[in-house]
């Protein structure tokens, strides 16, 4: 087990590329502590905002629950009724929240690496947690996935993990393939081969799903992102055919090792990526992932508060 020297302290938490293997393990261990009841005492009242410019249920509410569990005051934000409709930029929206007293924000946007302009702006001082950027990164989802795997197996070294599905459009796939490799797991890919592009090849090989299911410790499925697929391709999409060729059918689940687990970032297209009845089967950890997401986001927010001297004590 990797030695953990000190709790993590980050100005911003935006990309898996910024985190070493030790940083990831520190996040995992603190997440487990929060799950076991750890609490923090804040140095003063702390304010957070969740600026989600792209639709979300799990990530948005999970960040808000995490903030409330930490004792943060959460400021409301509705992009459909905000000054964005009047042409205000994201940068000025963030600076507005900063000016009125927000200490940290979680942001999701459809633009890849939207956060670069913000963290490079010398006039932005509040902490930024990336809640997802386009088809780029989904750091908090990746950390909760790692925590779920670690909770199950107690290690990463030598684990075989398959990432299956809509690779091209998935920020989860990109974040997870990077961190799993850093932690010593063996990564494999499956799904429509045209979605297995050059940027995935250095992290693992593509194989037909039927060649993987009996060998994997973790079968991680990805949602087919209809909203990101070009209309000409999506128009001929067949859910039934996709499930038969690339999905987790009952027959494939029966071939999985007894100790193996099923994961999915959700929302699940039941009967497409995973057979309806398997979403909540004994091997499934899908709702456990959602539960762990709150504690991971508590650790993310705490790391930024710790950096700013806003954590008085931890117990």
Image: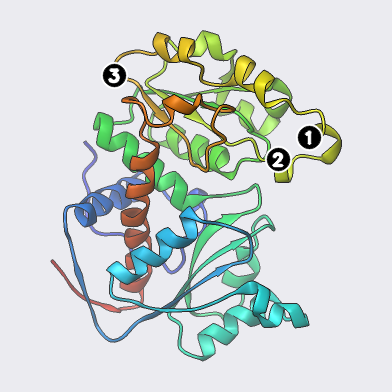
Of mark 2 and mark 1, the one earlier in the sequence is: 2
Side (left or right) of 273 relative to 184:
right
Q: Is residue 62 left or right of residue 90?
A: left
Residue 213 located left or right of residue 31: right
Residue at (61% x, 71% y) in the render: 118
**Residue at horizontal 66%, vertical 34%?**
199
Crowd tier of the residue under label 1, counting other residues whose Cα lies within 10 Å: few below 14, some 14–19, many 20 or above: few
| Label ID, residue 226 | 2
Residue drawn at x 50%, y 78% is 76
Marks 3 and 2: CB-CB under 8 Å? no
Per the model, the C-alpha gap separating discs 3 and 2 is 32 Å
For this view, does 57 lie left or right of residue 31? right
Counting residues from the start of the chain, the first of labels 1 and 3 encountered is 1
Measured in 3D between alpha carbons, the distance from the residue under mark 1 to the one under mark 3, in whole angstroms, is 36 Å
Residue farthest left in this picture: 315
Rounded to the nearest whole Å, what is the CA distance between mark 2 and mark 1? 7 Å
Label pair 1/3, CB-CB below 8 angstroms: no
Q: Is residue 43 visible?
A: yes
Q: Answer above or below: position of 54 versus 43.
A: above
Task: Name the residue that disc number 1 marks.
Answer: 234
Percent position of residue 167, x then y: 63, 33
Tell which of 117 and 70 is nearer to you.
70
Residue at image point 16% right, 58% down: 37
At which x and y percent is residue 241? Answer: 68, 18
- Please state which of residues 228 and 13 is positioned toward the viewer in this rendering: 228
Q: Which residue is disc 3 drawn over?
A: 259
Number of numbered discs present? 3
Q: Is mark 3 on a helix, strand or loop?
A: loop
């Amino acid at each position: 087990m990797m030695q953990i020297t000190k709790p993590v302290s980050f100005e911003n938490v935006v990309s898996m590329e910024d985190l070493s293997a030790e940083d990831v393990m520190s996040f995992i261990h603190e997440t487990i502590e929060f799950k076991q009841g750890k609490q923090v005492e804040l140095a003063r009242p702390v304010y957070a905002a969740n600026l989600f410019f792209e639709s979300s249920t799990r990530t948005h509410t999970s960040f808000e629950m995490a903030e409330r569990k930490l004792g943060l005051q959460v400021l409301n934000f509705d992009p459909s009724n905000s000054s964005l409709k009047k042409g205000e930029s994201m940068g000025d929206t963030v600076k507005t929240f900063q000016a009125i007293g927000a200490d940290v924000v979680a942001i999701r946007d459809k633009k890849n690496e939207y956060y670069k302009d913000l963290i490079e702006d010398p006039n932005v001082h509040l902490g930024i947690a990336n809640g997802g950027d386009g088809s780029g990164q989904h750091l908090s989802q990746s950390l909760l996935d790692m925590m779920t795997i670690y909770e199950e197996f107690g290690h990463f070294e030598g684990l075989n993990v398959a990432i299956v599905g809509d690779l091209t459009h998935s920020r989860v796939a990109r974040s997870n393939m990077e961190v799993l490799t850093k932690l010593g797991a063996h990564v494999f890919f499956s799904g429509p081969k045209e979605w297995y592009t050059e940027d995935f090849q250095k992290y693992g090989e593509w194989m037909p799903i039927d060649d993987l299911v009996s060998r994997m410790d973790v079968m991680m499925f990805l949602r087919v992102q209809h909203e990101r697929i070009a209309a000409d391709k999506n128009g001929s999409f067949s859910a039934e055919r996709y499930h038969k060729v690339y999905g987790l059918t009952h027959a494939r689940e029966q071939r999985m090792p007894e100790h193996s687990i099923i994961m999915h970032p959700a929302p699940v297209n039941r009967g497409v990526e995973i057979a309806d009845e398997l979403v909540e089967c004994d091997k499934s950890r899908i709702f456990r992932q959602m539960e762990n997401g709150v504690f991971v986001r508590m650790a993310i927010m705490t790391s930024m508060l710790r950096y700013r001297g806003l954590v008085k004590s931890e117990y």
